[in-house]
Image (spheres, rainbow, N blue to C red):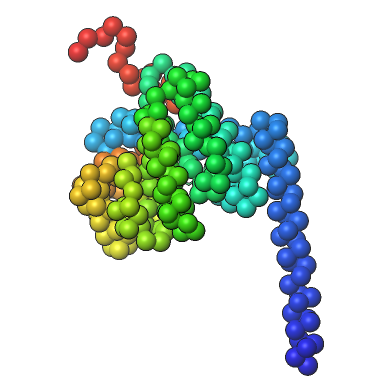
Amino acid sequence: AAKKAGRNKFAYFEPQMDQRLQQMRALELDIKQALEKNQFKLAFQPIVDAEDQSVASFECLVRWTHPTNGKMMPAKFIPAAEETGQIMEIGRWVTKEAIKTAAAWPVRKQISVNFSAVQFQDSRFADFLRRQLKRYNFPADLLELEITETAFIVDMENSLKQLQQLKDLGVKISLDDFGTGYSSLSQLQRFSFNKIKIDGSFVRDLETNPSSAAVATAVAEIGKALDITVVAECVETQEQLDFLRSVGVTRIQGYFTGRPMDAEAAEALLIKEAPAVGEVG
Ligand code: C2E
Ligand code: MG
Ligand code: MG
Ligand code: MG
């Protein structure tokens, strides 16, 4: 009887596994096409100063409109691309496109791109990055790589070594989605990050969940103590902004202060903010 039940169980799960595999393969092919046919685009979301809401930098986020399926969300295809290794090529494309775009703006502004842990396997990435910065004559210190805590789980020593090699190019390194991962605090001691980004999950329910407010406050304190700039992501209301500012968060990112926008809109925003040429005082 047990044997029979086991067999039934197996027969029940197998088609599902198969389906997942097929979906993964289809997505892999679609991503391959997207890379070949240049279907990816970048969106630029302003990260603003908590005091005066002037633009401090832009986070560059990958966007993909599939020819038949429409808009695809990074939360879905980035993990798939990490699984297949295609993130290596996507990551290079995003990095190059971000540098190229920001280098053409009439106003110099810091930009950040997300760097997946899987990209540590791209052993020539540092070389690639150096070449792109040179090619577009873009100052290294205006580029920031955002890396999530989970990046350090598999091989912490190696990850930190590679991260240092990237930092040695002069680029900035920020710790993304802070508070969601594992052993956050020890990482802050092991590597000198330029920024910490409080994960949106703590911002979303700031007003209703005292423990989220406590986490946000604690991260702001850590930032002050270690002299690291703290950014809050996913800020959607004035109340959230006011609270975060009151506890010492100095940078704000979210729909309340600016949605991700295309390159032209980002450039227009910078030009609007910059003092007019020839203006004095
Ligand atoms: P992330 O790096 O934490 O990026 C912030 C995400 O929060 C973005 O989602 C952004 O659109 C969203 N967001 C910003 N403000 C708000 C807000 O006020 N409310 C809400 N609900 N959401 C807000 P997006 O672009 O869908 O990206 C999701 C994640 O996918 C990113 O999280 C990042 O982990 C990954 N990702 C996006 N682009 C890239 C990329 O080029 N390379 C890699 N490796 N990962 C990427
Ligand atoms: Mg990010
Ligand atoms: Mg984030
Ligand atoms: Mg996040």
Q: Quadrant of residue 277?
A: top left
Q: How many marks?
A: 0
Counting from the top left corner in percent of width and height, residue 159 is at: 45, 50
Q: Is residue 60 left or right of residue 40?
A: left
Q: Quadrant of residue 39?
A: top right
Counting from the top left corner in percent of width and height, residue 258 is at: 40, 35
Write the residue at 56% across / 42% down: 122
Q: Is residue 196 left or right of residue 218?
A: right
| Residue 111 sits above or below residue 227 on the image | above
Q: Quadrant of residue 174?
A: top left
Write the residue at 49% across / 36% down: 126
Residue 44 in sight: yes
Seen as rendered, the residue at the extreme bottom is 1
Write the residue at 41% across / 58% down: 180
The C terminus lies in quadrant: top left
Counting from the top left corner in percent of width and height, residue 155 is at: 47, 56
Write the residue at 32% across / 18% down: 274
Residue 241 in sight: no
The N terminus lies in quadrant: bottom right
